[in-house]
Structures are given as structure tokens and as C-alpha cells.
Image: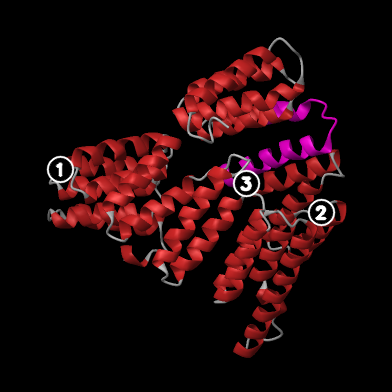
Amino acid sequence: LEAQTGDFDAARLALSEGAEASLKTQKVESAPLFIAWARLEEKNFGRSDLAFDILHKAVGHCPDEVNLHIALAQLELRMGRVTSARNILSKAAEQPISQSRRGGALYNAWVNLEQKVVQDEPRALALVREGIEKFPAEQSLYQTLGTLLDRKGDYEGAVAAFRESIRIHPTGAAFVAWALMEERHKSTKATSPSAASVLSAERKSVEEARRLFERGIRSDPTHGPLYNAYGAMELRHRNADAARQVFERGIAGNCSGMVHVWHGLGTLELRLGNIEEANAVFRSGIERADMGANIEDTSFLLHSLGTLELQSQRPAEACAVFSEGIKRYPNNSHLLLGAALTEHKLNEIESARTFFRRAVRADRKHAHAWQAWGVLEAREGQIKAARTLYESGLKECEDHAALWQAYGMLEVQVEATDRARALFKAGVERCPENVHLL
């Protein structure tokens, strides 16, 4: 409640006192207190170090609580310590776990690390099969198996996995994964390479996806991400009215993750050119979230609203939105970047630099922040500083084509042709599909 009303100091006090009091007990129920406290320290105070200490102490207090091991591993990942995160999850998996749900959560976190961070898909697939062998009644593991098999190109295997997940327990998340796969796999339904056959297959794929989304709503009517994915699919196929109806159904149903549905509706209005309607939707989503019983992350709604105000040539309004966002989420790199761009627009160069510095400190992998800061320094005639920023950004984000392009164009502007040519060549090698580098 204190965090929801913006009083993060009071929230910190309440959580710390509750967590410290729980140290006198051996109750597993105290684990959410430690997780919430650590998340508050990391997200709202920028204290990843303190968050680590909190979770490390909590794991010692409740060594059998799987969610604490997962939270600690995920924090390690956000701090860039991949090996440590993997070791935490591996050791946790060696312990006896009585509940399938907790075992599923642990293996899903481990699979996510191997697939998305380490990018070792064979290892991820082996792990999810290991998890299923240990916890055959956990539906989420079959859902993860379906997603991995889909990525591998095993359509029939993925369908079987999604079907088994839903047979065990139908969830909105499983229906979303299955529906989106059906939408993408239109080629499997085409009877010939002709345009008419491909178009017919696409229609059938969308109809099948739509059928699965509707089944998902019947099974899990308050699952917010389902409405968001459903509406986004309709929008991709230029069914704007259908998309709006889906988003409005989710809002009317007071679904979970409501902020995502509001964001989807606002994005729809933006795509249609309804700027003021989008502005009103984003503001309504933030207001409704603030009034809700559950604390929801409104950072991306605030970011979208602030960006919209800035693009609408209303920098003062954008400044107010980003200020409010940073007050709530002081370590959010995207909000900090938005504030930096706004200050630049207002010609407040030193203030912009401060926000750029905070943005890249909060997320070293935020390529756009490095690029935008480099552009500012180049325009201010600080060529050496711009070069340093582009090089720092490319060290962290070497596959970001826009950074290579911006750095190359800087060298063109100062007539360092050989340096520019070398940068464009290196960028093409790293990002061969980016035509702007050619």
C-alpha cells in the first residue's frame, strides 16, 4: 500500500521490519517479504547490492524455499553474473522439492537462463525434459517444452506439448503460446506455393489462433496478457475494430495485468493516428492502476505517455510525466532516457547529460541510451566524448546496428573517411541485415 501511494520510504520500513521479525520464525511464508523488500531496494532505490544481501540472508533463513533461490538467481542475472545465477539454480534443483508448481518454477527459470541468456537451446531442451521427468504433473513445463519445440521447428511436437499442458491444467499463458504459434505457422497449412493458397492458409491460421484465444478466455477470463496478445494479433492483421473490442473486454473484465491491456489499447490508438485518444488511454491506465487493490508496474505506461507528449511537441508535459515516473522507478533506464531526451529538447544540456549518465548506469545494455548520448555530444562539438560513448555502447551492444551507423556518420562529419568506412564495414559484418549500414 505504501509503495502504491508512492511512499517508498514507508514501504521500505514496513517490509524491513516484517522481514526482520520473521527471522525469529522458521515459516516459509516469510519468503515473499524478503523478495518484496529486495525488489523494492533494487527497483525503487537502485540498491542491487542491498537486494543481494537481503536475498542471501533469506536463503540462509529459508533454504528450502525455491522462490528465494529463483529471486536470487534472477537478481544475479540482472547484475550480469550469469555463472553465479546458473550455480544457484543448479544447486536448488538438487534439493528435494515436494510441490510440482515450485519445481516447475525452478526449472522454467533455469531453462529461461540457458535459452535467452546463454543461448544454449539444446541445453534448455534437455533441462525442460529433466524437469518433466521429475514433475510430470506440472503443466507449465509442457508449455515451455512446446515453446522450445516451436523454436526448433517441430510443429507437431509443439502442438502435442501445448495440448498436454492444457489437459493437465488450462491456463491463459498456455493458450497464448499455442495461439501465437498457430498464427506464425501459416506455411504449414498452405497446400501450394500460390498466392491464393498462402492467403487461404493465413486466414485459417488466424482463425485457429482466434479459436484458441477464445478458449483461453473461457478457461482463464482474468488473464490480462491473453487479451493483450489477442488484441495485438488482430491489429497485426488490420482488424482494428476487433482489436479494440478485445482490449475493452479485458478492461471490462477487470483482468490481471490490467496495465498491459491499457497499454495495448493505447498502442492501438497510436497506430491509428488517434494521438489524443492514446494519451487519454495511457493516463486512464495509470490512474486505474493506482486505484487498484494490487500494485502493478506502470513504468512502461508512464514511458509511453511521456514519449507521446515529447513527440507531440509538449516537452513541459513530457518532463512532468518522466519526473513522476522516475520518482516511482528511479532506476528505470527507459524513463531516465526519456527524461534525458526531454531535457535535450528543452536545451538543458547538463541536465540531459545527468539523465543519460543515470540511464546507462542503470542498464549498461541500453543501446539507445548510449546512441542518444553520443548524438548529443556530437552536436555539442564534443567529438572525443561522442567517440568514447559510441565505443562504450558497442562494447556492451555490439549487435546494435544504429550504434554502428551513428558512430560511422560521426566520422563522416569530421571527414575521417577511413575510420567511417571501417566502422560501416564492421557494422555490416555484425548486423548483415541492416540496409542503412550498406
Name the residue rendered at 27%, 54% in the picture.
406
Mark 3 neighbour density, 10 Å: few (under 14) some (14–19) many (20 or more)? some
Q: Main secondary structure of the magenta part?
A: helix
Q: Which residues are magenta?
A: 89-118
Say which mark, if any, is on residue 70. none
**Type of amino acid under label 3:** Gln
In the rendered image, residue 147, in percent from the top left (x then y), is placed at 70, 55
In the rendered image, residue 198, in percent from the top left (x then y), is placed at 64, 83
Instruction: Choose between 398 and 389: the one closer to the eye.
Output: 389
Q: CA distance from mark 1 to mark 3?
A: 40 Å
When the figure is inspected, residue 119 is found, relative to residue 233, above or below; the finding is above
**Type of amino acid under label 1:** Gln
User: Element under label 1?
Assistant: loop
Instruction: Choose between 338 and 315: the one closer to the eye.
Output: 315
In the rendered image, residue 46, in percent from the top left (x then y), is placed at 44, 29
The residue that disc 3 covers is 115
The residue that disc 1 covers is 382
Give the quarter of the figure containing the N terminus. Answer: top right
The residue that disc 2 covers is 165
Q: CA distance from mark 1 to mark 2?
A: 57 Å
Name the residue rendered at 67%, 39% in the picture.
109
